[in-house]
Image: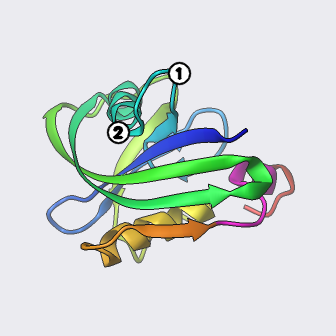
Amino acid sequence: MFIVGAFVTIFDEQKRVLLCHRCDYDLWNLPGGRVESRETPWDAAKREVKEETGLEVSIERLSGVYSKPEEDDVVFNFVSRIIGGKITLSDEADEIKYFDINNLPKNTVPKQVERIRDALDCKSEVRLKTQTGLGAIELVKQGKL
C-alpha cells in the first residue's frame, strides 16, 4: 500500500521558490507531508503549509503526480499562492526562505528539485513521473547529500 504525500510549490513575484529547512535533518524541502485518513491531497497540502510555515495558501493547480516505488510513496505536487498568514518557524521548519531556482541549496531534496522545475516549466499540463533512487533521508545517512 502506498503512502500518499502532498507538497506545495510557492513562487514569489521573482519566480523564487519557498523552501523550508527541516529541524530533524539538514535538508531543505517544499512544505508538505503525509495525507491523513479521510483527507484530500489538496486539503493536506494547505494544512501542511499552515503547520510548517504559518502561511495560508490557495491551490492554483496540480503540477505533478510522482510515484516513488522504492519508498511506496505517491506524491501530489501543487502550485499555490499565499492568501494569508505570515512566515512563522515551527517544530518542523527552523528556517524558511525563498531561493532562486538556479541557486537552490546543495542540500535540497533532489526529487523535490525535479518537482520544482516541473511546476515552473509545465503551466498547462500535469506531469506524471516515476522517481527512482534513494530517498533524501537515506542519502543524508549515507553522507551523499
Which residue occupies 34% across, 31% down?
43
Q: Is residue 78 left or right of residue 37?
A: left
Compared across the picture, whether 128 is left or right of 86 comes to right
Q: Is residue 104 visible?
A: no
Along the viewing direction, whichever of 124 and 112 lies nearer the viewer: 124
User: Which percent across, then down, holds residue 87?
Assistant: 27, 34
Magenta stretch in the rendered image: 131-140
Q: Residue at x 22, y 38 (%)?
A: 57
How many numbered badges does the structure rendering display? 2
Residue 127, x across and y down, in percent: 44, 70
Is residue 138 toward the left or the right of residue 121 in the image?
right
Secondary structure beneath dot 2 equals: helix
Determine the residue positioned at 25% across, 59% down: 11
| Quadrant showing the N terminus | top right
Q: Which mark is residue 42?
A: 2
**Rendering coords of residue 65 (x, y %):** 49, 58
Mark 2 Cα within 10 Å, few/some/many (few <14, many 20+)? Answer: many
What is the x, y in percent for residue 95? 44, 40
Q: Which residue is mark 1?
A: 37
Instruction: Tell me the kind of residue under disc 2.
Output: Trp
Q: What amino acid type should be assigned to the residue bearing mark 1? A: Ser
Neighbor class of circle 1 (other Cα within 10 Å; few <14, some 14-19, many 20+) is: few
The answer to which of marks 2 and 1 sits earlier in the sequence is: 1
Query: Residue 134 vs residue 94: left or right?
Result: right
Residue closest to the eye, 136 or 132: 132
Judge whether residue 34 is colored magenta: no
Q: In the image, is residue 134 part of the stretch drawn in magenta?
A: yes
Does the image show residue 64? yes
Residue at x-position 36% and y-position 27%: 47
Q: Mark number for residue 100?
A: none
